[in-house]
Image (cartoon, rainbow, N blue to C red):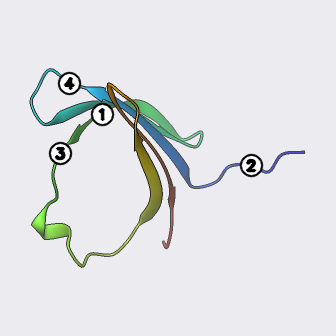
Amino acid sequence: MAAEASNVGSVPDTKSPAPGALTARRIFTDRYRGPGVGTAGPRDDIAGGEVSAVGVGMDVGNGSAVDWRKVGR
């Protein structure tokens, strides 16, 4: 029997017509699925902030793919 995936998400992104943005399809376990928008570039206000998720991402040609897991609270 496979273990239930808990606190795991996936975000496949494709390039958006808007400069510096990605069209996202957000998936979080069985609790949430839906569209979103990813924006490019680091933000100064998140430096030193609390880490709420860890993951890995990769370039997949016309966008990116990110898998992550919630940590902490």
- Drawn side of residue 38 relative to residue 56, left or right: left
Binning the other alpha carbons within 10 Å of mark 3 as few (below 14), some (14 to 19) or many (20 upward) gives few
- Would you name the residue on which mark 4 appears? 16
Residue drawn at (74%, 49%) of the image = 4
Q: Compare marks 1 and 2 and give the one earlier in the sequence.
A: 2
Residue 39 at x, y percent in the picture: 19, 42
Q: Compare marks 4 and 3 and give the one earlier in the sequence.
A: 4
Residue drawn at (37%, 71%) of the image = 51
Residue type of the residue flagged with mark 4: Ser
- At mark 3, the secondary structure is loop
- Would you name the residue on which mark 1 appears? 36
- Would you name the residue on which mark 3 appears? 40
Residue type of the residue flagged with mark 3: Ala
Residue 55 at x, y percent in the picture: 47, 57
CA distance separating discs 3 and 2: 32 Å
CA distance separating discs 1 and 2: 25 Å
- At mark 4, the secondary structure is loop
Quadrant placement of the N terminus: top right
Residue 35 at x, y percent in the picture: 34, 29
- Would you name the residue on which mark 2 appears? 4
Residue 31 at x, y percent in the picture: 54, 41
Residue type of the residue flagged with mark 2: Glu
Residue 25 visible from this viewpoint: no
Callout 4 touching callout 1 (CB < 8 Å): no
Residue type of the residue flagged with mark 1: Gly
Binning the other alpha carbons within 10 Å of mark 4 as few (below 14), some (14 to 19) or many (20 upward) gives some
Nearest to the observer: residue 26 or residue 58: 58
Q: Compare marks 4 and 2 and give the one earlier in the sequence.
A: 2
Q: Compare marks 3 and 2 and give the one earlier in the sequence.
A: 2
